[in-house]
Image: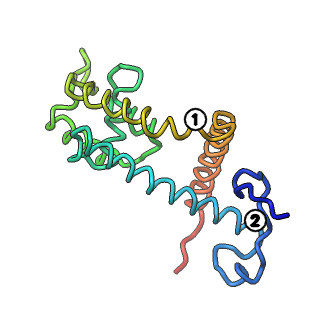
Amino acid sequence: MMDKTPRFERGNHPRMEPTYYRNWHLAKDETEFKVTELEFAVLRVLEAFARWVASVDEMVGLSELKHGEHVILHVIRMQNRPKSGATIARLLNRDDLPNIQYSLRKLEASGLIEKLKESGTKNYTYTITKLGETLTNEYSRLRSEILIRKLRGLSEFEARVEDATDLLSILTGIYEESARASATLNRAP
């Protein structure tokens, strides 16, 4: 009898037939195949997440925001305390501070955040406005109602999402270290 349990719930992935990945430059063996599958899954989930965010943003009146601006808005609201551009960059693992600053200016111009000068310094932080709070509350409500409800229906979701989060955190470190290591190598002529 054929097992009708979805592949992702069985916990063991069947080996890929070598003829299917033998000539692929990113998957020359089983390990490379599995890593490539993970990388493509991450890319697909990022795109699906961006579409989800855009869809809900349109419902709550944030449709003028780009995905990165939306994420920055929620990071600013996180823990209900102001954050600097550098803190936002660190929390998002981004090194493109000029792009973050551009997004902050757009969010400020739209009335969703306000810029605060730290007393006695030249530093600025950003905090959510009442409008920003109202719109992020509505986003949160719809997220709970639509998305979280579906996720709670998955078997053992909380344990599985913890495992996935731990794995992604480990992989973030490995990719970061690999990027540092590659920066010390000579480039091809």
Marks 1/2: CA–CA distance:
31 Å
Image quadrant where one finds the N terminus? bottom right
Depth check, mark 1 against mark 2: the one in front is 1
Assign a secondary structure to mark 1.
helix
The image shows residue 162 at horizontal and vertical percentages of: 65, 36
Say above or below: 13 vs 158. below
Q: Is 174 or 165 nearer to us in this picture?
A: 165
Left or right: residue 86 versus residue 122 is: right
Say above or below: 179 vs 84. below
The image shows residue 93 at horizontal and vertical percentages of: 47, 43
Disc 1 crowd, CA 10 A, few/some/many (<14, 14-19, 20+): few
Which disc is residue 8 wearing?
none
- Residue at 14 percent across and 37 percent down: it is 109
Q: Is 35 or 8 nearer to us in this picture?
A: 8
Which disc is residue 31 wearing?
2
What's the amino acid at mark 2? Answer: Thr
Visible in this render: residue 124?
no
| Residue to which mark 1 is pinned | 152
Q: Earlier in the sequence, mark 1 or mark 2?
A: 2
What's the amino acid at mark 1? Answer: Arg
The image shows residue 39 at horizontal and vertical percentages of: 59, 60
Assign a secondary structure to mark 2.
helix
Left or right: residue 55 versus residue 19 is: left
- Residue at 25 percent across and 26 percent down: it is 134
- Residue at 40 percent across and 26 percent down: it is 78
